[in-house]
Image: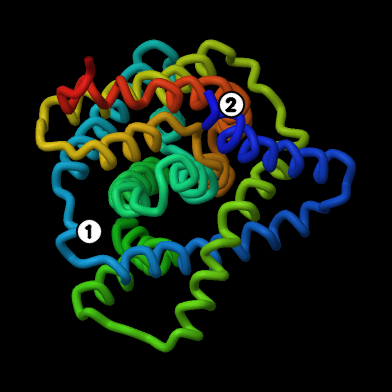
C-alpha cells in the first residue's frame, strides 16, 4: 500500500495538476503542444538512448519478452479487430483503431516514469524492449492497415509507413541506443549529464501534458464499444501477457513485473493522434484515452499492489 501512496498517486496527481492547468487556461493548447514536442523530440529520446547505450547487448537482447509480450499483444489485437467487425459492425479503418486502442499502452508518457519509480532504473530495459515492439510492429501494422483502407484503389503505402517509422525520434533513439551499446561507445561526462537532465524531465513533463490534453474531451455515445476497448486494454491485455510469459516459461522476476505493469497501462494518446490524422473514429479514440486513464488510477494501483504474488505464479516463488 505504501507504494501506491508514495509513488503511484503522486504520478497521477501530476496528471491532475495538468488537467487543472488546462481547465483554468493556465496552460494553453499551444503550451501543451510545446510540452509534448519537448518530451517527444528531446526528453524521451534522451532517456531511451542513454538507457540502452549504457547497457551491454546481452542485457538488451531479451527474446522471451518479445515472444511473450509480442505474441500476446498480436492475439489481443486480432481478437479485438474481430469483435469490432462482428459485434459492432465497424468499417475496416475503425476496426483497426478499435484494436489499436485496446492494445497500445501509454508507455512513453506514463509507463516509463511510473514503472521506474516502482521497480527502479533496472526495469527500464525490459520496458524499452516492449516499447520497441509497440512502436516498430504494432504502430506500423496499424498504419499499414489504415493506409490500406484509405488506398483501397491499389496504391502502395508501404514505403511511406517505413519512412515514417524510421524517422520517428523515439524509434531512432532505440535504434541508435542499441547501436551505441553494440559498439561500446563512450562520450564526455558533460554529454552524459545533458542526456541525464533531459531524460529526467521526460516523466514529469509527459504526465503534466497528459492532464492538459484530457481537458474538454467528449465521451463517446457508443458506450458498449468504449467498455469493450477499456476491458481489452486494462484487463485482457495484461492477462494475455501473463499467459504469454507462462507459456514461454523462461522469465526473470524483474522483467516479468515490468512488462506486466506496462501491459496494464491506460491507452496511449497517440491512438487519438492517429485517429485524427485519418479522420476516423475520432470521438471514441479520444474517449478511450480519457476513460482508461481515469479508471487506470484504480486498476493500475491495484495491479501494482499485487504484482509480486502475480509474478510469483510465473516464477514459482508464491508461498
Return the residue nearer the eye: 194 or 71: 194
* Label 1 crowd (10 A; few <14 / some 14-19 / many >=20): some
- Residue that lies at the very extreme toward the bottom in this rendered image: 188
Q: Which mark is residue 60?
A: 1
Q: Which residue is at a point 49% across and 26% down the rendered structure image? A: 300
In this rendering, position of residue 234 left or right of residue 145: right
Picture layout, residue 260 above or below residue 55 = above
Residue 275 showing in the rendered view:
no
The residue at 51%/77% (across/down) is: 193
- Residue under the point 61% across and 30% down: 5
Can I make out residue 260 in this image?
A: yes
Q: Position of residue 263 (x, y in %)?
A: 37, 33
Q: Which is nearer the N-term, disc 1 or disc 2? A: 1
Element type where label 2 sits in the image = helix
Q: Nearer the viewer, residue 75 or 59?
A: 59
Q: Which residue is mark 2?
A: 297
Image location (x, y in percent) of residue 262: 39, 37
Q: Which element type, helix, strand or loop, lies under badge 1?
A: helix
Amino acid at each position: 500500500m505504501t507504494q501506491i501512496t508514495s509513488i503511484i498517486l503522486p504520478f497521477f496527481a501530476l496528471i491532475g495538476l495538468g488537467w487543472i492547468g488546462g481547465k483554468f487556461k493556465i496552460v494553453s493548447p499551444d503550451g501543451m503542444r510545446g510540452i509534448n514536442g519537448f518530451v517527444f523530440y528531446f526528453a524521451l529520446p534522451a532517456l531511451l538512448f542513454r538507457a540502452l547505450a549504457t547497457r551491454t547487448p546481452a542485457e538488451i537482447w531479451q527474446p522471451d519478452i518479445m515472444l511473450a509480450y509480442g505474441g500476446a499483444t498480436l492475439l489481443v489485437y486480432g481478437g479485438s479487430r474481430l469483435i469490432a467487425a462482428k459485434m459492432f459492425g465497424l468499417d475496416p479503418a475503425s476496426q483497426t483503431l478499435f484494436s489499436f486502442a485496446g492494445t497500445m499502452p501509454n508507455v512513453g508518457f506514463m509507463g516509463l516514469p511510473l514503472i521506474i519509480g516502482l521497480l527502479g532504473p533496472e526495469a527500464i530495459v525490459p520496458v524499452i524492449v516492449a516499447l520497441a515492439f509497440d512502436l516498430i510492429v504494432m504502430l506500423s501494422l496499424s498504419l499499414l492497415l489504415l493506409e490500406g483502407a484509405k488506398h483501397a484503389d491499389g496504391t502502395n503505402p508501404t514505403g511511406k509507413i517505413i519512412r515514417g517509422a524510421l524517422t520517428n525520434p523515439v524509434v531512432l533513439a532505440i535504434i541508435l541506443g542499441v547501436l551505441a551499446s553494440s559498439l561500446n561507445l563512450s562520450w564526455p561526462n558533460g554529454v552524459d549529464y545533458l542526456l541525464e537532465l533531459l531524460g529526467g524531465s521526460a516523466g514529469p513533463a509527459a504526465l503534466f501534458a497528459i492532464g492538459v490534453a484530457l481537458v474538454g474531451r467528449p465521451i463517446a455515445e457508443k458506450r458498449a464499444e468504449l467498455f469493450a476497448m477499456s476491458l481489452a486494454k486494462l484487463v485482457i491485455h495484461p492477462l494475455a501477457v501473463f499467459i504469454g510469459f507462462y507459456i514461454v516459461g523462461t522469465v526473470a522476476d524483474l522483467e516479468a513485473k515490468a512488462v506486466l505493469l506496462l501491459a496494464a497501462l491506460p491507452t496511449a494518446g497517440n491512438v487519438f493522434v492517429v485517429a485524427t490524422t485519418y479522420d476516423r473514429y475520432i470521438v471514441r479514440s479520444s474517449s478511450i484515452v480519457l476513460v482508461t486513464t481515469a479508471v487506470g488510477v484504480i486498476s493500475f494501483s491495484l495491479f501494482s499492489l499485487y504484482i509480486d504474488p502475480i509474478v510469483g505464479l510465473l516464477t514459482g516463488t508464491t508461498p
